[in-house]
Image (cartoon, rainbow, N blue to C red):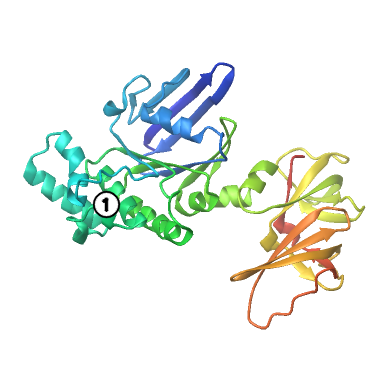
Amino acid sequence: MVSMIEIERLTKSYGAFHAVAEFSLTVAKGEFVSLLGPSGSGKTTLLNLIAGMTRPSSGTIRIDNVDVTNLPPSQRDLGMVFQNYALMPHMTVFENIAFPLQVRRVPKAEIRRRVAEALDLVRMPQFADRKPRELSGGQQQRISLARCMVYRPALILMDEPLGALDKKLREEMQIEISRLHRDSGITMVCVTHDQEEALSMSDRIVLMREGRCVQIGTADELYFNPTSSYVADFIGHSNQLPCTVAEEAAGQLTIALGDGSQRQAPRPAFATPPGCGATLHVRPESATLAAAPDAAHALKGTLEASMVVGSCIKHVVRLDTGDTFLVQELNHRGRTRPQFGAPVWVGWPTDAAQLLPPS
């Protein structure tokens, strides 16, 4: 792997508060990495440290094998894309995209050629003479990307680039940014609090909490193999039931739930001696609902709500243990649904469950 960014033990402190604490990360050339986390997790501070807009308290940052820890943004060979587009309203689309080339004193003929290439890349060649106010939000964001890519930076940083768009347009732009990344091969690092955005666009996701990395991995790794209850709950929806390990046999564990019933679960990576506590994690789409108990549905509860969300139905069940359990099933025409307040039983395949350390 050829590295584009190497961050070693990076810290940014404000008095006793560590916005970023002992953070290390390597990003490969051509990779798309998302910094994901809630407000206050340190993701924007980390992006500003990489960009050079904030100076670290300690640690080092290398971009394309050059130590840039103390260099200003202008000497880091990177581009920035912001949530508010930052287009100059008095300039045309062509002039906005050409501006960074003019600052670099690129010859006029070369400017015309490279702006035309950038407009073709974002599929907007016919908009060259328009002003930003004549464009939709998605079109303005594409022009913002074109302006960033036109001077061919080694690295593009994006700070909540789709936050100002509505849901449908945001989904369309996720596809567009993924295409631009694939076609250009430029390394991209994106800050977002939107898990769907991170899951759909990223080669890898860095999930952050309180200035630290909680887990790094692909979308599948974070979704199907979370290392903690926090990751399981933040990425998608998670049913989490406290349990106790009863015994182990043939690579599987027998666990006891709060109502005293026992279930099977795959053996986790951490030590689970009999008697230790753990958290049973089951994704809602892996669970099923039944109107009567059977071998596959043995956990009893009461149906509290059913929500139709287009192609799926989300059932909220209050288990007899007192825990809330979410079951997500595909929707279809003519489907019969259980009545609110009716007794129901939930179940899941053994291999769809996962044991996590106690939350």
Asked whether, in this view, residue 128 is left or right of residue 185, the answer is left
Residue type, mark 1 in image? Pro
Q: Quadrant of residue 300?
A: bottom right
The residue lying at 79 percent from left, 62 percent from top is: 317
Whether residue 154 is situated above or below residue 176 in the rendered picture: above
Seen from the viewer's position, the closer of residues 288 and 49 is: 49
Q: Quadrant of residue 68?
A: top left
Q: Position of residue 244 (x, y in %)?
A: 86, 44
Q: Position of residue 343 (x, y in %)?
A: 87, 68
Mark 1 Cα shell of 10 Å, populated few (<14), some (14-19), many (≥20) = many
The residue lying at 59 percent from left, 71 percent from top is: 311
Q: Position of residue 158 (x, y in %)?
A: 39, 42
Asked whether, in this view, residue 21 is left or right of residue 290, the answer is left
Read off the residue under disc 1.
132
Whether residue 357 is situated above or below residue 284 in the rendered picture: above
Asked whether, in this view, residue 17 is left or right of residue 45, the answer is right
Q: Quadrant of the C terminus?
A: top right
Q: Is residue 277 visible?
A: yes
Q: Considering the numbered disc 1 on the image, is that residue within a helix, a strand or a loop?
A: helix
Q: Quadrant of the N terminus?
A: top left
